[in-house]
Amino acid sequence: MSHLAKEELNEWIGDPQGYTGGQWRYAILQPGQTIFFNSGTIYFLFSVSKGQCLVLGGHILQWSNVEQWLEVIIAQIRNPGILNKNARLIIAKYVDVVADLIRRKGISCIRDEGTAEKFLDNIKAFDRVFITEEGPTATPHVVVQNSEDGM
């Protein structure tokens, strides 16, 4: 499912195993084929063959939707039932890397001002949620804004 309305997303988050709403699609991949999902796409994977299946997943960051990526991360931290096992620490590392990239390059690497502002707000929201969940050992992120671009 992709391009969910907020209500649909909240319903799915509330019961990811039992949710039956939304517009579901499927694809049958043949050997050697690849599929790509944008941040926030809800997906399930089934192997229909008796042979081996190799699945690799990860986060692909696009500056054009970095704020949406972080919104998905925040939803995952708030709702551990929608996460794979042991994903919390990996997620925190992803956020560390992205925050560090932006700290070094400057927030101007996100060209759209609205996206940059949403990203900064989402970093603060991530810190509030993660620190609340992890306790006093969690370290907040500090993203330095560029003085020359006024953001």
Image: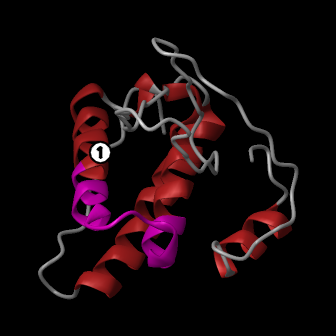
In the picture, measured across the screen, residue 85 lies left or right of residue 1, that is left
In the picture, measured across the screen, residue 89 lies left or right of residue 52, that is left
Q: Quadrant of residue 111?
A: top right
SS majority, magenta:
helix
Residue 36 vertical placement versus 30 (above, below): below
Comparing 55 with 77, the one in front is 55
Residue at (24%, 82%) from the top-left corner? 134
In the picture, measured across the screen, residue 122 lies left or right of residue 40, that is left
In the picture, measured across the screen, residue 90 lies left or right of residue 5, that is left
Residue at (21%, 31%) from the top-left corner? 104
- Spot the residue most to the left: 137
- Spot the residue most to the top: 32
The residue range painted magenta reads: 75-93
Q: Pointer 1: what residue?
A: 99
Residue 36 vertical placement versus 127 (above, below): above
Q: Quadrant of residue 83?
A: bottom left
Q: Secondary structure at mark 1?
A: helix
Comparing 123 with 46, the one in front is 46
Queried whether the magenta region covers residue 140, the answer comes back as no
Q: Amino acid at mark 1?
A: Ala
Residue 94 vertical placement versus 126 (above, below): above
